[in-house]
Image: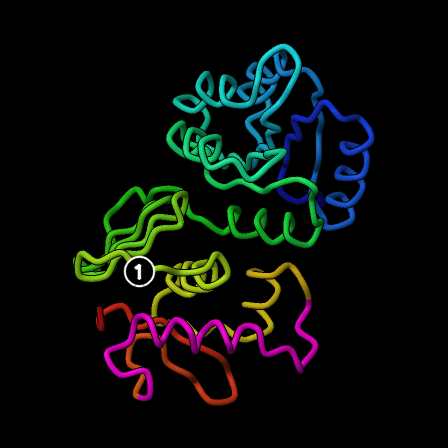
Amino acid sequence: MAGPHILLVEDDAKLADILQEYLAKQGFKVSWVGDGALAPERILSEAPELVILDLMLPGLDGLSICRQVRNQYAGQILMLTANDDDMDQVAALELGVDDYVCKPLQPRVLLARIRMLLRRPMPPAEASSKPSVSASSRERRFGRLTLHSSLRRCTLAGLEIDLTPGEFDVLWLLSSKPDEIYSRETLTLDARGIEYDGLDRTIDNRIASLRKKLEVDPNKARRIVTVRGKGYRFVPDQW
C-alpha cells in the first residue's frame, strides 16, 4: 500500500531521479514535474500530502508557484534553496512555505524534514478540550509558550528563545502530543531521520539544552520531563 503522496517540482532530472528512488524506498508515492509553469495545475489537481518545491525553476520560479497555489492547497510545502540566502527563506515563509532545505541535499536531513511536516495535523475542526492550548498546523500555544513551526520561532513569556533547528524540532515533536511519552527511538527517527542505535546521545543533549533555556530550574524539570526507561514527556500545563 502506497504511503503519503509527494509531488517533486525539480528541473534537475538527475536529482529528481535520485530523490524519487530514495523516497520510494522510504514508502512514499512520488510524482515529478520538471517545468515550473506546469507545477500549479499539477499541485492543485493531484493534491499531494506534500510538495517538494525547488526555488529556481524554468517557466515559473518556486516563490511564484507558492503564491499561486497556497490559498487553494492545504498540504505541506517544503522548498529547496540553492544557497543559505536569508531573503529567499524569509520570502518563502511569508508566502506560506512550511519549511526549507538548502542544497546540496543530505537525504537523511530531507527525510527528517518530510516526516516532521507530515506529522503536523491539519487545523482541527473543534477546539481542544484544554483551553490553555491552541494548536494549528503552524502555531501552537501552551500558556506563555508559543511555537511557530514555519519560522522556527519560540517565545516564552513574551521573550524570544534562541533555539537551534535541532532543538526546535525536538520541542515541536514533543508538543505535538502533550502528556504522551516519546521514546528516544521515535525522537531520533522523526527529528533526525535515522534509526536509534542505542548509543547516540544527540536527543538527550538536545533535551538538556532545551531545559537550560526553558525550565525555571533545569535540575528539576517540570515542563519536559523524563519518564525513566521510556523517554520524554511534554507537560502542557506547566508553561
Residue at 78% from the left image edge and 48% from the top image edge: 25
Q: Nearer the viewer, residue 4 or 235?
A: 235
Q: Is residue 138 magenta?
A: no
Position of the N terminus, as image quadrant, is top right
Q: Residues within 10 Å of mark 1 (few under 14, many from 20)?
A: some
Would residue 231 be found to the left or right of residue 102 on screen?
Answer: left
Would residue 184 be found to the left or right of residue 207 on screen?
Answer: right
Q: Residue 126 appears at what percent x and percent y?
A: 26, 46
Residue tagged by mark 1?
Answer: 161
Q: Is residue 38 above or below residue 161?
A: above
Residue at 44% from the left image edge and 19% from the top image edge: 67
Color encoding of the figure = rainbow
What amino acid does circle 1 point to?
Ile
Q: Is residue 205 magenta?
A: yes
Position of the C terminus, as image quadrant, is bottom left
Q: Residue 110 appears at what percent x and percent y?
A: 64, 47
Q: Is residue 145 above or below residue 207?
A: above
Within the image, what quadrant is residue 94 found in? Answer: top left
Secondary structure beneath dot 1 equals strand
Q: Nearer the viewer, residue 102 or 18?
A: 102
Q: Residue 205 appears at what percent x and percent y?
A: 50, 76
Q: Residue 90 appears at what percent x and percent y?
A: 41, 34
Which contiguous range is marked in magenta? 195-219
